[in-house]
Image (cartoon, rainbow, N blue to C red):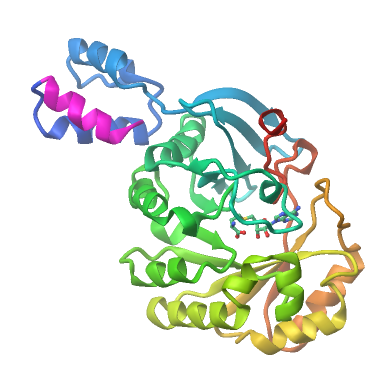
Amino acid sequence: MDLALLDTTLADLGQPKFRARQVWSWAARGAAGYDEMTDLPAALRGELAERVPFSTLTVERETRSKDGTLKVLLSTHDNRKIETVLMRYKDGRGSVCLSSQVGCALTCTFCATGRMKFARNLTAGEILDQALYFRRQTDITNVIFMGMGEPMMNLDHVLAASRLLPDLGVTHRRTAISTVGWIPGIDRLTQTDMPIRLALSLHAADEDLRSAIMPVNDRYPLADVLAACERFYSVKKRQVFVEYVMLDGINDQPHHAEELAAVLDPVIYKVNLIPYNPTDSIYDGSARDTIAAFRDVLEARGVRATIRLTRGQDIDAACGQLAVKAAAA
Ligand code: SAH
């Protein structure tokens, strides 16, 4: 829902100030439309339905994975396509993976979104509407900005959306922003009052190798990025999650794990090793025992490491697979 449009429309209609809040809290709790807002005058519900689209996004297609992961293809008012994913876990968590941009300006060599052109930033309303789409079906407990785009390059809107997520049942502590290491964004997150978690897509501890697979490393070298993460930790006292995608023969050898352990303070960082999901890139994923051996080297050096469970791979909803084939063509 476009909350600014809601405000001006209510003002136009001469409605009292509390109405906007009333409408928003119904939407945030998963109402399907204005009709359900029974404490609003019927005439007003009708006016709103005409003047403020209930969602800024329309649904193009929903796909369900064998593991229960749901992926939805959404269309913006200017006909841009974005994808959003819901992962449900046995312990009751419902985690939504949100997109922050249409396409991505960065060119990480292994990522499907990185091969799409950047089109534009999403608004705060468009970001919230992705989460609301799933909120209307189920309880959601966690949000991760790990969908399409680089959230730190659209941080105003990402933070504005995050500020309202508690109304949907997602606390700031259960909200995480993942970045390639966009230092100005990390520094801003350090300064916000919200206890949002930081995740860093690291992928190679060696500067040259990292630059080769993630060109953004030339602009913000890893050493400087880690210094920014350490400032974040010292202010926020929250561990930083390191994402490390395992590329066969590229960054997955024991010496790469040694190099990684050497740059990570185990008090500050926890590593999540990500099995590579096939996209049409030049890379293959590492073998399972290569990933396990890598984890063992990290653990032996005192760095906590887990291997990410891959979800939604059969529907191209897994990490790095979010590129809209229809729209890209
Ligand atoms: N731009 C941000 C947010 C996107 S998060 C960031 O890079 O952190 C998407 C995560 O999935 C990143 O950690 C990215 O490196 C990882 N990823 C990208 N392509 C992947 C692939 N094909 N398989 C597994 N993980 C991938």
Q: Within the magenta stretch, is there residue 7?
A: yes
Q: Nearer the viewer, residue 22 or 257?
A: 257
Q: Is residue 27 above or below residue 45?
A: below
Q: Residue at x 12, y 27 (%)?
A: 11
Does residue 145 appear in this view? yes
Q: Nearer the viewer, residue 216 or 240?
A: 216
Image coords of residue 31 (percent x, y): 38, 26
Q: Is residue 263 above or below residue 164?
A: below
Q: Residue at x 55, y 81 (%)?
A: 224
Q: Residue at x 20, y 24 (%)?
A: 9
Most frequent secondary structure within the magenta stretch: helix
Does residue 175 appear in this view? no
Q: Within the magenta stretch, is there residue 206?
A: no
In this picture, residue 84 sits left or right of residue 255: left
Give the quadrant of residue 74: top right
In this picture, residue 282 sits left or right of residue 308: right
Image coords of residue 24 (percent x, y): 28, 34
How many tags in the picture? Answer: 0
Image coords of residue 185 (percent x, y): 44, 66
Q: Is residue 115 above or below residue 77?
A: below
| Quadrant of the snapshot with the N terminus | top left
The stretch of residues the image draws in magenta is 1-13
Give the quadrant of residue 72: top right
Quadrant holding ligand 1?
bottom right
Image coords of residue 183 (percent x, y): 49, 71
In this picture, residue 29 sits left or right of residue 69: left
Q: Residue at x 48, y 48 (%)?
A: 141
Give the quadrant of residue 212: bottom right
| Quadrant of the snapshot with the C terminus | top right
